[in-house]
Amino acid sequence: MNRIAFCACLGAVALSGLTEAGTKTGVKQGKTDKDAAWADVNEPVQAAEDDWRVYWKDGVRIESAEQGVAIEIGGRIMYDLGFLRGHRYENDGGPDLTDYAEFRRARFYISGSVDEYTKFKAQYDFAGGDVAFKDMWIQRTDLLNFKIGHFKEPFGLEALGSSKNITFIERASPTIAFSPFRNAGAMIGNTFNQASGTWALGIFQKTDSTGDDDDIEGGWVITGRTTYLPRYADEGKALVHLGLAATHRDADPDFQYRARPEAHGVDFSVDTDPFDADHVTAVGAEAAWVHGPFSLQGELTETMVDSSVGDDPDFTGYYVQASYFLTGEHRPYDRSKGVFTRVIPNSNFGGGGPGAVELAVRYSKIDLEDGDINGNEQANITVGLNWYLNKNMRFMTNYVHTELDDPVDEGADFLLFRFQVDF
């Protein structure tokens, strides 16, 4: 893709205003005479206990009597089990297959607002015994939602959705390989046409898991995304989502794409190995359809690499998935961000109801072969069963079958389980 075409993709992002509204309820006591006396002498005042309201809403919420001041405390725990079988992997020199158990994610965050327009979030992940930044940003909502810090680049429907809400235990292989996920940078974005669409545009610098770029090469990145809802009815129970994203980035001198089968405890199975590249341009198209308890979703990503030596390879990947709620729920959608959000059961398990039960299937393929690069091709079929006990807890089961193009073999099979709670 030449620079004119790339600019045209980003030019599709439209500008408009974003209006956010929310309502909260509670009881607040009046200030005491002592508080008033302190205020009379214009001294800083320690807020009385009854000037703050602490309550639970998907996590701990703390609100001040002062307008716009609030704090939210939360996190997520995801514990995974994997049982793995495969002929090629065991016998023909491929990655070893070993049953595993791990805390896939163990995160804690604090977020909130210090006034009507200024928001912040600080989120850490402790999985694997290491501490890593996830979201670490400041946002000004009255300046086109200007955000600065460490957060996800605006690219991809599945990538931008929270891991708390994705349909399968792992994102599709093309999403993992091609989506840029989090980096340090600045971004603006908004909705348009009465929240029927969204746009976002940012400039980023590639960083490590602590937001540091000292040991990272790769230069600057520009990434943009726009989405639109041709149809949105019955509070999201019927919708059609379309999206387009593009990113142009200076490449690392040892540039590399690689992906696992869709099981985190398995080694990388398709890999370009490091090669010389100057620039990388990626374009992603996304679509989703929700009709009551049924949903259909897919994404296609193409990456074009300007190589320093040899041919300029192009790599592609796509996935298509479908899901159905046996208990009648639907996948909720956030119109301000253009992503799917938390599933809310019609009736919680343990409260006289079954919770929410969802069946899902996905097919994905990634091709890392082109020109002088022989990174192999991989296809995955995943069948999933999700049981949402309530909106904060779910159990997940996935069966994954994966096959590589070379050598042709009997493939490998993974049975995965996740126990998840978030707040």
Image (cartoon, grey):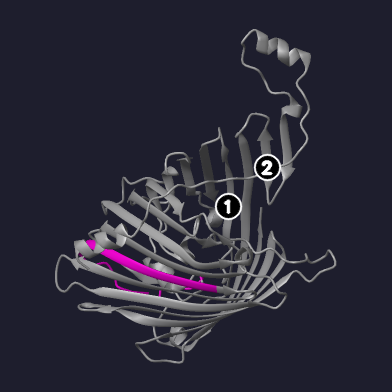
Which amino acid type corresponds to the residue marked 2 in the rendered image?
Arg
Which residue range is magenta in the image?
A: 264-289
Q: Position of residue 179 (x, y in %)?
A: 39, 64
Dot 2 corresponds to which residue?
A: 61
Tell me which residue sits at (42%, 39%) in the image.
143
The crowd level at tag 2 (other Cα within 10 Å; few <14, some 14-19, many 20+) is some
Dot 1 corresponds to which residue?
A: 107
Residue at mark 1 to residue at mark 2: CA–CA distance: 17 Å
- The answer to whether residue 330 is magenta is no
**Nearest the camera: 224 or 265?**
224
Which amino acid type corresponds to the residue marked 1 in the rendered image?
Arg
Pick the quarter of the image with the N terminus. Answer: bottom left
Q: Position of residue 371 (x, y in %)?
A: 20, 78
Q: Quadrant of residue 26?
A: top right
Is there a contact, CB below 8 Å, between mark 1 and mark 2?
Answer: no
Relative to 275, 205 lies left or right: right
**Nearest the camera: 2 or 354?**
2
Q: Position of residue 76 (x, y in %)?
A: 62, 55
The crowd level at tag 1 (other Cα within 10 Å; few <14, some 14-19, many 20+) is many
Mark seen at residue 89 = none
Q: Position of residue 251 (x, y in %)?
A: 25, 59
Q: Quadrant of residue 2?
A: bottom left
Q: Secondary structure at mark 1?
A: strand
Give the residue at the far top of this rendering. 41
Q: Secondary structure at mark 2?
A: strand
Viewer-side label of 1, 2: 2
**Nearest the camera: 162 or 310?**
162
Relative to 27, 8 lies left or right: left
Residue 363 can be seen, yes or no = yes
